[in-house]
Image: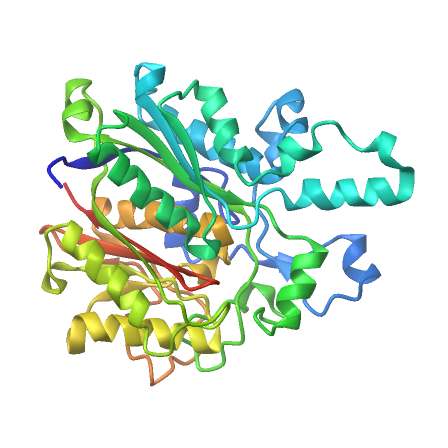
Amino acid sequence: MSKKIVVTGIGASSPIGGTARETWEALLAGVSGAKTLDYDWVEQYELPVRFAAQAKVRPEEVLERPVAKRLDPSSQFALIAAMEAFADAGSPGVEPERLGVDWATGIGGLWSLLDAWDTLREKGPRRVMPLTVPMLMPNAPAAAVSMHFEARAYARTVASACASSSESIVNAYEHLQAGLADVVIAGGSESAVHPITLAAFSSMQALSKRNDSPETASRPYSVDRDGFVMGEGGAALVLETEEHALARGARIYAEIAGGGVTAESYHITAPEPEGKGASRAVEAALAAAGATAADVTHINAHATSTPTGDGAEYAALRAVFGDRVDTIPVSATKGATGHLLGGTGALEAVFAVLAVSERVAPPTINITEQDPAIPLSVSATPTPLGDGPQLAISNSFGFGGHNAVVAIRSV
């Protein structure tokens, strides 16, 4: 790939902060976003898991009421993150036909769909909102961002489960390389803290059941890890060619050096035990970056804190990095934020961008005793990365065997 693609803006609404900077500072401070849910439906449905990592700042506190009312929460978070990122990038004065949107969601407008179903059953068809379908569509977040910014180059949606928004960033990188746009708003969002998802993930034994200690429930790499914590929110990055960014005098955070996307074709939920598909995605990202495994100085791991998932990812990393993998500073940030599903890759890409930019690997919280079978270099405190060139990879893996890895280089 001949063009250098850079990050000029970041935005986020997460369980630990209402903005990208607030989220980053809370992450460095070791804050957890998981809390007990205070809703009548928790007791009504006798849910086995009664906590989640909801967004710290509710969308209605940020968006004007008429705007919020026409959007599912997944689209609300998309718009909030994108607006912050675009402003952070200096609101690039780009022609609408040269501004693109690569967005992602794993589930989409879950609340709009199920609220409409409840209305239909309880009040009849005449009371179902006319905007129900536009609100529940998986492409609704991308459409909302596109229409807000009048982005007319394209507006594309990825739905690859928990790999979705890392894949959207890889797509944005490739679309900029192909000359389809000069500036792209890329990211992902999710709002699926709902009784049906909590019940379903609990049924498949995927969620932690530590109702007595939500803040410490997400325990990546810990010997007593028992599942992930549901999170919600969104994150966005403004990407553009270095030539375009320099021409307008933009601040540059980091370079999106490359990306890799693969499929495992192994199982609808379980990861391939040896991490073969995941390792190929890492290798593809490094190849696109013109880098080798020896160049990597930081890893933001997918690390959901499930018993099988963390081990499979370690196998994938060991296949690529060999023994050196146990010396590279690794951050498993879902310990703090929970798992944002389709929004998680974008949020963790923001973390990786800031890690290489500020030369610090964020901490991993809640490890009571690290699993000896996963002897990664994981720190409970922020870890300096040094003054030299930095190359990070940010991993995302999803149900269905979707793997997406983003390589991010310091500038």
Above or below — where is 247 with respect to 343? above
> For residue 285, which quarter of the picture?
bottom left
For residue 53, side relative to residue 176 (left or right): right
Q: Judge whether residue 31 can be spotted in this image.
A: no
**Residue 243 % position (x, y):** 14, 26
Q: Nearer the viewer, residue 410 or 95?
A: 95
Which percent across, then down, holds residue 278? 31, 66
Up the image or down, 392 lies above or below 247; here it is below
Residue 76, percent from left and from top: 57, 34
The answer to which image quadrant residue 295 occupies is: bottom left
Which residue is located at x 48 percent, y 50 percent?
A: 342
Picture coordinates of residue 262 (x, y %)?
32, 59
Depth check: 280 or 289 in front?
A: 280
Residue 239 lies left or right of residue 311; in this view the side is left
3 relative position to 353: left or right: left
Residue at the far front in the pictured view: 265
Image quarter hosting the C terminus:
top left
Examine the rendered structure and indicate whether residue 260 appears above or below residue 148: below
Q: Which quadrant does the N terminus fall into?
A: top left
Q: Residue at x 90, y 38 (%)?
A: 123
| Residue in view at x 50 percent, y 39 percent | 18
Let me know if residue 14 appears in the view: yes
